[in-house]
Amino acid sequence: MYMTPRLLLLFTVLAVLAPLASAQAPTEPTSREPGIYELANLFKQADTVALVKIVAGDTEAYDVAIYKAQVITSFKGGPAGEPIYFGPYLGERLGWEYLLFLRNVPQTIAPKAASNAGYGTIHYSKIFDEGYTSMEVSYECVFDGKDIAQQCDYGVRVCTDYIRLPQSLPTFPPMTKETPFGCRRVRKAVFISLLDTMTNPRK
């Protein structure tokens, strides 16, 4: 088939631009399925395991959300009473307690603007497993017992579809019932006792 010089030039230009256009096209974001961990393995893989109280949060000074927390009880990592910085997920509640399983980030993170913005240049740790290693502590009336005093207690929210607990550990509701995102409550005192056993296996 005969092509005029103008038509030939047009096809040449299109042939050159087509690969460039497809290479620069934005890719669709992909959602990553969280891993499934036995609690004991999660404990081993974390650099820090601690019960903390979040005292501050910053979503402006850094490229990711960074929280400052006070360590109440340390099961692995730094000592109790020390401040720690962690991120990068939004939604953690200021003033609330959390049980955190964290991995250290080797590099420091600096504020985007002034050197003294936010908390300054800091070492921080990451919540991993798509956020499921941050476990909120709250007062709930969902536990077993004959009266309200027994049914209401502090509990830890554990998403048991991804964090596998020992079968002997009671969850509320029980594992036989469906729950949003597979998340259930475990009595805080019982969960902390279990982590304490992992910290000190000879106890």
Image: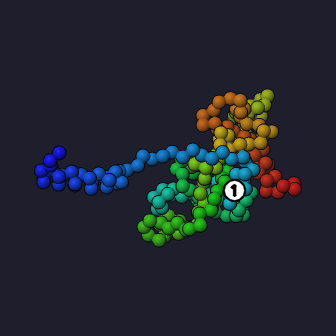
**In the image, residue 159 lies at what x, y percent?**
65, 41
Crowd class of label 1 (few under 14; some 14 to 19; many from 20; radius 10 Å): some
Q: Residue at x 57, y 44 (%)?
A: 33
Q: If the image is split into quadrants, where does the C terminus sit?
A: bottom right
Q: Nearer the viewer, residue 69 or 132?
A: 132
Q: Is residue 188 visible?
A: no
Q: What amino acid is at disc 1?
A: Gln
Image quadrant in which you'd find residue 76: bottom right
Q: Is residue 174 depicted above or below 30 in this figure?
A: above
* Left or right of residue 29: residue 83: right
Q: Is residue 46 visible?
A: yes
Q: Nearer the viewer, residue 161 or 18?
A: 18
Image quadrant in which you'd find residue 23: bottom left
Q: Residue at x 47, y 71 (%)?
A: 115
Q: Is residue 75 depicted above or below 163 in this figure?
A: below
**In the image, residue 167 lies at what x, y percent?**
78, 38
Q: How many marks?
A: 1
Q: Residue at x 71, y 62 (%)?
A: 77
Q: Residue furthest bottom?
A: 115
Q: Say which element carries label 1.
A: helix
* Left or right of residue 201: residue 75: left
Q: Is residue 117 depicted above or below 131 in this figure?
A: below
* Left or right of residue 39: residue 107: left
Q: Is residue 33 depicted above or below 16 in this figure?
A: above
**In the image, residue 124 lies at what x, y percent?**
59, 63
Image quadrant in which you'd find residue 82: bottom right
Coloring scheme of the render? rainbow
Q: Residue furthest front?
A: 1
Q: Residue at x 72, y 40 (%)?
A: 186
**In the image, residue 134 lies at what x, y percent?**
63, 49
Q: If the image is split into quadrants, where does the N terminus sit?
A: top left
- Where does label 1 land, which residue? 45
